[in-house]
Image: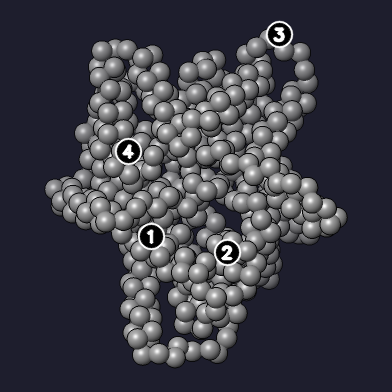
């Protein structure tokens, strides 16, 4: 069930909203929480009910380990650090089995010239997100920063449907106080108006903008055999903007849906293509993943406390792990390596006290991100090389009709760039009072997005694949 599907927008979301607040109105708080967990698990199972035992087993396992680390279960006699290590290894093993087993087998077959059959495992939906979220919970429990006695509360923290499938990766302390607050137990019409506005903007970004660029990106990466200079740049930039508006749209829709229930999810996306350097980009793109990598990978590795060389090594390792988290393939490893190296170079540049004009800094940063996305998008090395060779070739367009198509494409790409650079992110509107003007705008973009989707099939959000 996609956020942009009719089932979600016209049936699941309104029913969940009205039943949840009806139960709260009847002072059935336990029933309301139970219903929201049930609705979230139903939402998850809609994709494939076979995934349900996996997430339920993961929930129960991490709840027990987390409470044991909190010393809520006094009967557990095990060194806390060993228990934490066991919990983390078990979570990583679950993720690794489903996500990386076939990748490992392929590489063994290549290196050793063997023919071990692949398992062809289906990747359970959202496993990367709920695994990282629960690893963070275990570490926070080890540090004494959580205290959750109630399995229902814990299940709600992990499964709350607006953030379940593709984030944001939330902390227990960010979510549970909101569900417990008596101010959040009644309908808040300000939050409803704001939520509908942000949800509608996100739907427009996804259905109208991202899915339009997806057609060109797919043609260039997956269907074309060769690309000339203009085709290759049109292909790479199409994916760059497809991913931007797809993830931005998902984030807006998640924030908007959560606000209907009076829950404020952490900001996960803040105009990242406005960044003037690569560090600024990662402070704006998938903010909660960057936070996770910083707090649970980079800092435990030593952060910047052990000298420059160790700092550079930790940065590189952290972003290679980030690349692997996104997908099982050497293209993702290289993408993570490129971003790690860019951060190393940026840190070295800053340590030398060097600066450059803002326009040049933005131009270099944006083009680096665009080129790196080629590896992120390519299904095979050959696809990445095809696009990159075209981008840096001198092969030009050779037909008038094709020339006009490219003019249209680059005109729309320019419009997308202007939108990216000169419009505000949804975080801006979270602090604004909704007016009739805002709601009229929401109604127009919502109506247009719905009408456009009538004639096309729904595209899965790109981060659902990770």
In the rendered image, which quarter is residue 132 located in?
A: top right
Residue at 22% in and 40% down: 193
Would residue 59 be seen by someone viewing this image from the given angle?
no
Which disc, if any, is residue 378? 2
Left or right of 60? Residue 301 is: right
Left or right of 438? Residue 304 is: right
Residue 179 is situated, as x and y percent measured from the top left of the image, at 39, 25
The earlier-in-sequence mark between 3 and 1 is 3
Gap between marks 4 and 2 measured at Cα? 30 Å
Gap between marks 3 and 2 measured at Cα? 51 Å
Mark 4 or mark 3, whichever is nearer to me: 4
Q: Secondary structure at mark 2?
A: loop
Residue at 69% in and 39% down: 97
Mark 3 or mark 1, whichever is nearer to me: 1
Question: Where does label 1 land, which residue?
Answer: 210
The earlier-in-sequence mark between 1 and 4 is 4
Residue at 48% in and 43% down: 166
Residue 49 is situated, as x and y percent measured from the top left of the image, at 49, 30
Question: Where does label 4 land, which residue?
Answer: 8
Image quadrant where one finds the N terminus: top left
Q: Secondary structure at mark 1?
A: helix
Question: Where does label 3 land, which residue?
Answer: 75
């Amino acid at each position: 069930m996609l956020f942009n599907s009719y089932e979600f927008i016209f049936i699941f979301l309104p029913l969940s909203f009205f039943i949840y607040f009806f139960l709260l109105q009847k002072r059935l708080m336990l029933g309301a929480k139970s219903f929201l967990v049930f609705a979230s698990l139903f939402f998850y199972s809609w994709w494939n009910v076979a995934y349900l035992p996996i997430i339920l087993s993961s929930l129960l396992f991490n709840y027990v380990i987390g409470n044991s680390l909190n010393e809520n279960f006094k009967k557990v006699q095990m060194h806390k650090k060993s228990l934490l290590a066991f919990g983390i290894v078990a979570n990583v093993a679950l993720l690794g089995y489903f996500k990386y087993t076939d990748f490992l087998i392929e590489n063994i077959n290549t290196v050793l010239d063997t023919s071990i059959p692949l398992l062809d495992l289906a990747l359970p939906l959202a496993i990367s997100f709920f695994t990282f979220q629960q690893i963070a919970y275990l570490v926070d429990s080890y540090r004494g920063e959580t205290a959750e006695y109630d399995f229902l509360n814990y299940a709600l923290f992990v499964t709350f449907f607006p953030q379940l499938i593709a984030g944001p990766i939330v902390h227990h302390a960010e979510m549970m106080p909101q569900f417990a607050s008596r101010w959040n137990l009644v309908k808040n019409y300000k939050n409803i108006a704001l939520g509908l506005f942000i949800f509608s903007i996100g739907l427009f970004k996804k259905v109208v903008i991202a899915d339009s660029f997806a057609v060109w990106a797919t043609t260039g990466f997956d269907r074309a055999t060769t690309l000339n200079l203009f085709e290759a740049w049109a292909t790479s930039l199409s994916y760059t903007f497809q991913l931007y508006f797809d993830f931005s749209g998902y984030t807006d829709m998640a924030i908007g849906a959560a606000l209907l229930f009076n829950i404020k999810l952490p900001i996960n996306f803040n105009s990242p293509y406005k960044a003037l350097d690569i560090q600024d980009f990662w402070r704006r793109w998938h903010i909660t993943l960057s936070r996770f990598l910083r707090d649970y990978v980079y800092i435990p590795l030593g952060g910047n406390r052990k000298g420059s060389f160790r700092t550079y090594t930790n940065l590189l390792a952290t972003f290679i792990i980030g690349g692997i988290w996104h997908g099982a393939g050497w293209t993702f490893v290289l993408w993570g390596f490129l971003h790690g190296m860019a951060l190393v170079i940026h840190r070295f540049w800053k340590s030398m006290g060097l600066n450059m004009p803002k326009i040049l800094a933005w131009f270099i940063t944006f083009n680096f991100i665009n080129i790196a996305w080629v590896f992120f998008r390519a299904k095979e090395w050959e696809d990445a090389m095809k696009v990159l060779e075209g981008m840096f070739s001198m092969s030009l367009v050779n037909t008038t009709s094709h020339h006009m198509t490219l003019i249209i494409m680059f005109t729309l790409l320019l419009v997308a760039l202007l939108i990216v650079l000169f419009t505000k992110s949804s975080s801006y509107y979270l602090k604004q009072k909704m007016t009739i003007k805002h709601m009229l705008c929401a109604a127009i973009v919502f109506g247009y997005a719905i009408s456009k989707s009538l004639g096309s099939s729904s595209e899965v959000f790109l981060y659902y694949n990770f």
